[in-house]
Image (cartoon, rainbow, N blue to C red):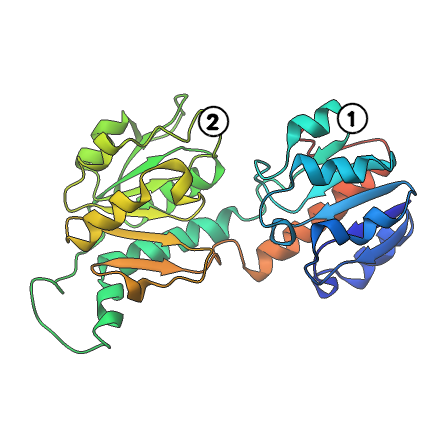
């Protein structure tokens, strides 16, 4: 058995590497490679792939999977993410390839990052930076307090629930929309109510074909003096991102989101905050990720598969 890991070796402890070496020969592919030159394409021994999306530009497609499968010895693919929409699951299912993911490893880190971005917008931190921190007492620079404000959370899964808890502890009123009702002390409502009434809005749902279009232009245009914070979804996939930018540059809303193409907030006018995708990237989250990743791999060899996507 060969175990190919597209990740940095120093993220694993010596003990974790030793455990993996008990079940197979371990290869770390630390440098990003051209997919058609992936080292595992050159051997026909039985193998498990531990893959990170950054090595695949978030698209492990059918073509690449087909090249691997031609060797007919691919036992499983263990993803380093909770999300699994970046791998062609249909192909894996049709070719009997086990796929696992890493659930709930970054709940606190992502939720805390969302709160950080909310605070940045409330305190006009993007505008402060764009003005080179020059003191300016003006209506544009007038900030807002968090306490007693209303937050709307779209999707009350693990991370959304943690955001709701943190906001409630800050003295905020929590509204939420979810496909199913949840037992909690928050108010379940419709999307229109959230976009019309919430001071801060967080989309916290998993991206799939069903959810990609739930945030319509009609809803976006109902926002008035709202702040919209997105840390878990690709904004271009789930709503009209250019419209959000337009409204924020006009001063009608505030907007925070993670970027993946090296653009920065200084290219935008208004209270727009952008950061690199660091929301999941804490010491604790990476330690949990790697630990679960190793457990998933070992469970497959032992015939007791865990965290299976399909």
Vertical arrangement, residue 41 with respect to residue 133, above or below: above
Q: Is residue 147 visible?
A: no
Q: Pointer 2: residues within 10 angstroms few (<14), some, or many (20+)? A: few
Q: Nearer the viewer, residue 8 or 54?
A: 54
Sooner in the amino-acid sequence: mark 2 or mark 1: 1
Where is residue 143 shown, x and y percent of the image? 16, 61
Q: Nearer the viewer, residue 119 or 234?
A: 234
- Local packing at callout 1 (Cα closer than 10 Å; few below 14, some 14-19, many 20+) is few
Dot 2 falls on a residue whose secondary structure is loop
- Residue 231 x/y as whole percent: 41, 49
- Badge 1 marks a residue whose secondary structure is loop
103 or 25, nearer to the observer: 25
Q: Is residue 137 above or below residue 114?
A: below
Give the total number of marks visible in the rendering: 2
Q: Kindly indicate the quadrant of the structure image that contains residue 26.
A: bottom right
Q: Which quarter of the rendering shows the N terminus?
A: top right
Q: Which residue is mark 1?
A: 96
Work out whether 111 lies above or below 120.
above
What x and y, as percent, mark residue 305? 78, 32
Residue at x-position 64% and y-position 49%: 56
Residue displayed at 18% across by 78% down: 134
Q: CA distance from mark 2 to mark 1?
A: 23 Å
The residue at which mark 2 appears reads as 209
């Amino acid at each position: 058995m060969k175990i190919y890991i597209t990740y940095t070796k120093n993220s694993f402890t010596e003990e974790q590497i030793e455990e993996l070496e008990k079940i197979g020969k371990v290869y770390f592919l630390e440098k990003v490679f051209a997919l058609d030159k992936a080292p595992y394409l050159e051997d026909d021994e039985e193998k498990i792939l531990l893959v990170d999306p950054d090595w695949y530009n978030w698209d492990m497609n059918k073509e690449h999977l087909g090249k691997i499968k031609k060797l007919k010895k691919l036992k499983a693919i263990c993803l380093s993410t909770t999300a699994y929409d970046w791998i062609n699951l249909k192909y894996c299912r049709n070719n009997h390839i086990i796929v696992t993911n890493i659930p709930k490893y970054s709940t606190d880190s992502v939720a805390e990052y969302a709160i950080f971005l909310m605070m940045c917008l409330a305190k006009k931190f993007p505008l402060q930076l764009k003005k080179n921190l020059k003191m300016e007492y003006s209506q544009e620079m007038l900030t807002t307090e968090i306490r007693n404000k209303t937050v709307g959370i779209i999707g009350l899964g693990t991370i959304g629930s943690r955001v709701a808890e943190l906001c409630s502890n800050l003295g905020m009123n929590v509204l939420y929309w979810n496909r199913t009702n949840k037992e909690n002390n928050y108010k379940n409502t419709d999307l229109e109510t959230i976009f019309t009434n919430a001071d801060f809005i967080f989309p916290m749902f998993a991206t799939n074909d069903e959810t990609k279009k739930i945030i319509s232009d009609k809803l976006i245009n109902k926002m008035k003096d709202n702040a919209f914070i997105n840390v878990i979804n690709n904004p271009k996939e789930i709503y009209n991102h250019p419209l959000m930018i337009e409204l924020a540059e006009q001063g009608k809303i505030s907007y925070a989101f993670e970027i993946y193409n090296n653009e920065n907030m200084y290219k935008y006018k208004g209270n727009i905050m952008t950061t690199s995708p660091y929301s999941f990237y804490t010491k604790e989250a990476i330690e949990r990720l790697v630990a679960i990743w190793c457990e998933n791999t070992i469970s497959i060899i032992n015939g007791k598969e865990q965290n299976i996507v399909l």
